Image (tube, rainbow, N blue to C red):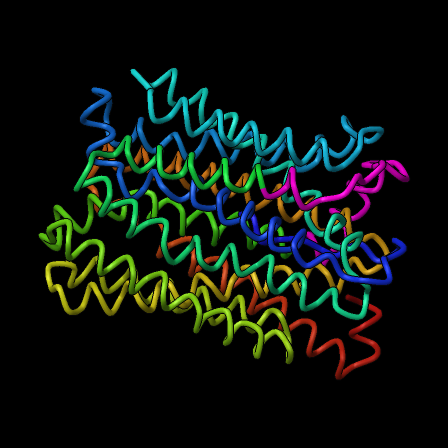
Amino acid sequence: MTEQIALPMDQDSPSTALWSGIAALSLSVFALVMAEFLPPSVLTPMAADLGISLGAAGQAVTATAVIAAVAALLVPVATRRWDRKRVLIGLMIALSLSNLLTATATGLVTLLTARLLLGVALGGFWSMVAATAMRLVPMSVLGRAMAIVFTGVTMATVLAAPVGAYIGDLLGWRTAFWLAGGVGLAALLGVLVTLPRLPARGSADLAGLVEVARRPQVLWALIAVLLIISGHFAAFTYVRPVLEQVTGLGISAITLALFVFGGAGFLGNLAGGLLSGRDPKLSVIVGAMAMATALAAVLILGASVLVTTAALGLWGMGFAMLPVGFQAWVATETTDKAELGGGLLTATFQVAIAGGAIFGGLLVDRFTILAAPAYCVTVAIAGLALVALRLNIARRSQASPVACRAT
């Protein structure tokens, strides 16, 4: 998942803000997340057109996530001597090629190739966007600048799935990716025109990744990510078939339901920020609990349109709380190595996305379409139990100096 960035803390910042460059980064993020989230909204017609199963089509999500996890760690290293503007341009070109190949795909191989390109663009861009923003604005307004960048994520989360479903039904699923390609080209132009030259400075060092990953709090957070986020993407990748086959919704109703899911994410972001201010683990616990409750409602009462729509709202709100909580949790434990902590968290998110899509596809093809949300409920409960246990240990440690030393 693309939102997990720890801000670099040791770079010199400019004296004046280049807001046009920040806007270009936001548009680029919107284009990347839009392309990432499109497959679930057009999964049924895409699979039918390409002559592949729903489970196989769902691996378009897996392919992107696997490569993004690797790219998040390796792209900054492989390009450490290159001008950062050129690197960002190259990544946006990869995004454009990905959308082109997807829109013209003739089978599973072409589709997966296209999504691999997207993975490179996604992981590479997210590994560099925060450091780039720091070179465009003074530190005093960096928070505002990153809020603008993350607006692109929120808008794509809200719009990509329902608009993709609507356009796919009206004009065909390929048109949805042509539209995404147009947005990607606009983002490429924005980066090309607005960003100044950004000569490479310093060098990327991955030697500390193992040390960061072995920190107890970070390790617990990463395990929770693997559980909870894999559950979300196992279910969300196959949300359209569930709405079609279980709830019996038509495309217009599906579009509305996905808008409810995305719109609720705004509330989730707000709630996640408030809870993280007290303790980031609270945001994770409440978010996972909301997600598990919502998917359990779909399993039990999924035939009800009202229940399913409400469940999608609760699900969307719960999921939006998770990135906020996980980011804050890891950031507070890696203040001395913030970039490594953020990169490691980004990579773990992508592994969780890939694992969720794989397990979801296997379950859907082997059992029923409801097997994916059942898996989500199971791992979400396991993840929130793990985080709640960690929160309890931390609070007991704070209350007892002896326990603190033992922990």
The quarter holding residue 292 reads bottom left
Q: Residue 313 appears at what percent x and percent y?
A: 31, 67
Q: Residue 346 appears at what percent x and percent y?
A: 62, 46
Q: Residue at x 76, y 37 (%)?
A: 84
For residue 261, above or below residue 178:
below
Q: Residue 195 appears at what percent x and percent y?
A: 71, 44
Q: Which residues are magenta?
A: 190-219
Q: Residue at x 49, y 64 (%)?
A: 384
* Of residues 398 and 59, the one drawn nearer to the viewer in this rendering: 59
Q: Is residue 192 left or right of residue 196?
A: left
* Of residues 115 and 138, the one drawn nearer to the viewer in this rendering: 138
Q: Residue at x 29, y 65 (%)?
A: 260
For residue 65, above or below residue 333:
above
Q: Is residue 173 left or right of residue 153?
A: left
| Residue at the far front in the pictured view | 193
What quarter of the picture does the C terminus occupy? bottom right
* Of residues 13 and 286, the one drawn nearer to the viewer in this rendering: 13
Residue 351 part of the magenta segment: no
The quarter holding residue 190 reads top right
Q: Is residue 248 left or right of residue 179?
A: left
